[in-house]
Image: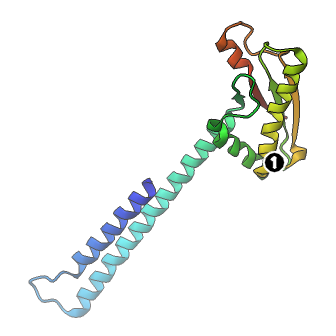
Amino acid sequence: MKINRLFKMIMLLLIFSTAAACSSTSEEEPASEVTQGSESGIDATTRRAQELEEEARARAAAAEERMRRSALANRVFYFDFDVSDFRQADRDILNFHAQDLAANPSKRVRLEGHADERGTREYNLALGERRSNNILNYFVVNGARRNQIETVSYGEERPADRATSETAYQRNRRVEIVVQ
């Protein structure tokens, strides 16, 4: 969005500079001097437009890198009660993780699935496994290699919060990405 606005401003600047360079003056000057002045003005404007475009690209690349780092720092994904599908809100962050794995074939991660204490031990182990497998499958579909990813389910055995409130249960329904 900012790049488009910057590009439009550069184009307007180029148009106005060209128009100003081509406008007539009250003094009559030799044609060769006017032509040289116009060309040097256009060249300077073009150079400045290119510099601005390069600066905009550099700022956009830096912003994208900050966003990528921020996304990769997020390694815990929460789930709704009795649901093994990750939230749609997490899709973009999971994409960054999948792209990072695809770009770094030697990188290895472990997906640790968890559940809250409600339900039987066996059911919660299976639910944690389904949760970690769903993220594994998403990573593979989006470019990661299967051999880069290990999954494990801890069920209710390793709670993030030992309280018995809905807030605590929410913190316990998760998959954690552990970089190995």
Tag 1 residue = 140
Whether residue 123 sits left or right of residue 170 in the image: it is right
User: In the picture, residue 135 is in which quadrant?
Assistant: top right
Q: Residue 122 appears at what percent x and percent y?
A: 91, 19
Q: How is the image coloured?
A: rainbow
Left or right, 76 with reference to 18: right
- Label 1: state its secondary structure: helix
Image spot of residue 65 (x, y percent): 61, 47
User: Front-most of 95 and 13?
Assistant: 95
Q: Give percent across and percent down for residue 83.
A: 74, 28
Q: Quadrant of residue 3?
A: bottom left
Q: Residue furthest left?
A: 26
Closest to the observer: 49 or 98? 98
Residue drawn at x 41%, y 63% as measured from the top left? 7
Q: Residue at 87% across / 20% down in the picture?
A: 123
Q: Quadrant of the N terminus?
A: bottom left
Q: Residue at x 19, y 92 (%)?
A: 30
Residue 171 vertical position relative to residue 48 in the rendered view, above or below = above
Residue 39, picture quadrant: bottom left
Decide: few, some or many residues near mark 1? Use Cα within 10 Å; few <14, some 14-19, many ≥20. Answer: some
85 w.r.t. 161: above or below: below
Quadrant, the C terminus: top right
Closer to us: 60 or 135: 135
Q: Position of residue 59 (x, y in %)?
A: 50, 52
The kind of residue on which mark 1 rests is: Val
**Image point 77% across, 29% down: which residue?**
176
Please indicate, yes or no, whether residue 125 appears anywhere in the rendered image.
yes
Q: Is residue 179 visible?
A: no
